[in-house]
Amino acid sequence: MKKALKITGIVVLFLVVLITVSPFLFKDKAKALVNQEIAKNVNAHVRYRDLSLSLWQHFPYLTIGLQEFSVVGKSPFTGDTLVSTRELRVAVNALSLLRGTQIKIQSIDLETPQILVKVLKDSSANYQIFNQTTASTDTAQSAFSVGIQSWQINDGRITYDDRLQGIFVQLNRFSQTGEGDFTQDVFNLTTRSQSEAMTAKLNGVSYLNNQKIALESTTKIDVLASQYDFKATKLIINEFPLEINGFVALPDTNIHTNIQFKALSDDLKELFSLVPGAYTANYAEVKADGKIAFNGEVVGTYNARQFPAFLVNLSVKNGRVQYPSLPKPLEQINVEATFKNSTDQLENTLIEVRNLAFLLGNNPVKGRVLWQGLKTARIDADFAAKLNLEDLTQVFPMAGQTLRGLANINLKAKGIYDGLTQFPVINAVANLTNGYVKTSQFPEPLENITFKGILLNRNGKIEDTRLDINELRLVLQQETFEAKGSVSNFADYNWDVEAKGKLDLGKITAIFPIENTKLAGKITTDLRTKGRLSDVKAQRYANLNTTGQASIANLEYTTPAYPVVKIQAANLQFTPRQINFANANGTVGSSDFAGKGQLSNYLGYALNNETIEGDFTVTSRSFNVNEWMSDSPTATDSTHKTVVEIPKDVRLTLHPTVSEARYDQMKMRNLAGVLLVENGTIKMNNVAFNALGGQFLTNGTYDSRDLAHPKFDFGLDLTKIDLGQAYQHLRIVRALVPIVEYLIGQVSSKIRINGLLQQDMLPDLNSLTGDGLVKVIQAAFKENNVLMNKMASYSKIDELKKLQLKDALMNVSVKDGKLNVAPFSFNYQDYKLTVSGQNGLNGAVDFKLGFDVPTQKVGTSLGQAFSGWTGKSLTNTDLSRVQFDLGLAGTYANPTFSFKGSNTAKNLKESVVAEVKQQTDALKQQAEERVVAEKERLRQEAETRIKAAQDSINSLVEAKKREAETRVKANIKEQRKRFLDKLIPTQKTETPPKDTTNH
């Protein structure tokens, strides 16, 4: 028994040691494999400090840990961090890794991650980082899948910034756990999420601002149908709990919704936590009474033409809220409101607040409003409030703020508003006296604030509407600003406005902060303007009484979207026709400027959305264009490199003179020319500057009218550009003409090129199209570069290592991401080369190199190589030059050469063929002559034989003839004798005498 226990203990100890030690044995291999897979599949900068393996953390699963893991994007998301986390841990079934068909992930843990999901206006997204696979690869991997059982996020920050849809969501101090079997087509996804501060905006309008969020949901997901069913999902915003049921389906470009929601509690305190500023750290101590009801639904289809129908109901009855640290309550709160749209068109929305009433200290507020329709609106409103502003700070938590003053607001409106001819009958009065505002951000108060305004329309006609600002006055640090004026006839604005005084923008924005914006500086103004809009449209400037001046001192404007603008000083003079600028100077980012000029039609621009025009002369000692193409140094996660939008309602002519400018990595000196800013474009006319050791002359256009696809079209006239500097400072040269890396020298060029710009304002190289002429003034290849070394080695022409070009002209074109070079020739020593082909953005090259080499310079090595290429020998020939073609493929960094043909070999072959033909023709002629002679001999011999045969035949025939005649005669004689013997019987007679007659 003891022996068995001992053996068991040894086995267990061995297994423990094996489980503990084995991950360390495979760590280096695992790290190499991870790096290999990242390099093969991910188009982004992926970094991590260390990799760990463990079988103990989630036994029996293998836990892979990546410490200080981050994924940083490439263009157009250069510098944007998609994911950054202190540690990423993945627990995976080790056997599934070995099988490779379905990787089973038990859990994923992210510690303090920062995740940024960004979509640009051209629909490109920063999470699109995985390299595309070929069709064959996709087919081969069709059975491959990843199954995730659970995940956990601890104390993270998640940002979703969708510039295409205008959606911005940020979750701070975010934690989440989730479970679901992602290997199934239909499964339940259970999540528990919490964020201590959630911000949500749509098209710049904030709907949630640092609200606390908690969510518990079980969602049925049908992957094939793209449908998500919510059942009893619980959402808590600050203290307000909601239940959500329904579904969202995304089968195609339509989004189908059927969602119902309702409050899980009727406690006013929970709803009141949603009021901006109300949810304080000690909110648990707030006392509240009153009942609420909140419910609604969203049902229908969302697409480019439709909007789902919706209904939201809110009711508050007899509410009362009392903060423990404040002396007065907010009480007698009653609200009855409905927001609904029963159609599929958003413009048919109805907003109805049937009752809004509360008592703010001793100040009653009461009103109602009906607003039906968004384009053409039917309005019926009645609102009244009399407020002692000091009571606000005694009822509502406003730490660090002091308010005083009496405000009185009365509004009655009823009728139709269409913006053209109809305006509601309205009588609205707003007054503020003895106003006082002080905040902890700025020690000095804004005081003696007075405002008196009236908006009046008695008959519903828009031309009978009148707005009077009888007094606007405020004092800040004994500096007074005053304004008053009126606007009548809203169909043809008739205005009379005057303003005088000083405004310290820095102090005002310290009291009234502007989100993500900093303003500073002083504006001093003394301005009077009076006129009618129809006179502006008709340019009857004599009828427009506008005079005055303004001065700007130490103005500073800071926003994440653009470099910091500082104006040390500027003087403005106003006339009816234009605003004259003088002595303006300042900085934009690190760039200085000074200028003068004028703006015309500024009244039409301000009052009638017309185009403002201007003409400015601007000088700068140093201007950095790159600051308009990159994130601001103070940018937050929500900012990114973005397209510079050119206003469509301006027409400005700029005459810049810049001593030094920087674009990308290139420095430009003595820049001058004309820039026309018009209708969303910038046109450059004869913009000249010195750069890259030479001179540039540019004519072209930058077009931002389609922000998702900005484009450019430039004509460039370049003179004596240094090749080394061009390669070092211009990305487009490195991408399209990488061979320049191996060259030193100068080129001139006239080229036209156009294409699209990415969201980071750098060219989309795949979109480039252009053509032109390039003249290589002089150029030589650097020593010991791989391209010429391999060419010399393959061709056996060692002189090519020092190849030079001079006065070489080439026609080039750019299309489909490729640089095409038409055939061009140049001479080097006694060699003549002809080059043509193309290279692509992926580095691949495809060129034909034609060589024309003196025969006397052909050494043994080249002669042997030539014989090997062609099967022909150059020995014993009288050719003066050797011609052959080589192919260049691969990349410039790793080139490959191949033999493509030879005119010399072709000529040698043709000479041999000609000689063989000549000999063949001679032999053929001799044979033909022998045949003729033989034929003649045979003919004569035949004729002789025929004649002899004929004579012999004739003699024979004659003899036969005579013989036949003799026989015939003898036969006749015999026949006659027989006949006579029969006729005359035979009698003995004397023998007659012999007949001597000739027969």
Image (cartoon, rainbow, N blue to C red):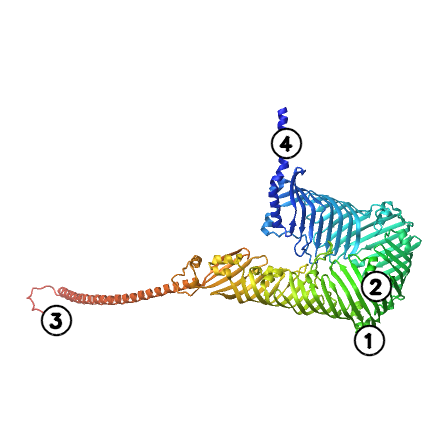
Residue 517, quarter of the rendered image: bottom right
Q: Which residue is mark 2?
A: 503
Q: Residues within 10 Å of mark 1 (few under 14, many from 20)?
A: few
Where residue 951 appears, as percent x and y from the top left, is 20, 67
Q: Which residue in the protein does label 4 denote?
A: 13
Instruction: Tell me how far mark 2 sits from mark 1, CA to CA.
Output: 30 Å
Residue 575: give x, y in percent of width and height.
81, 72
The mark that comes first in sequence, 1 or 4, is 4
Circle 4 SS class: helix
Q: Position of residue 275 (x, y in %)?
A: 84, 51
Query: Which amino acid, by three-letter code, is at mark 4?
Result: Leu
Q: Secondary structure at mark 2?
A: strand
Tell me whether the residue at label 2 lies in contact with that at label 3, contact meaning CB atoms closer than 8 angstroms. Answer: no
Q: CA distance from mark 3 to mark 4?
A: 160 Å
Foreground residue among 635 and 56: 635
**First in sequence: mark 2 vs mark 3:** 2
What residue did someone put label 3 on? 998
Q: Quadrant of the C terminus?
A: bottom left
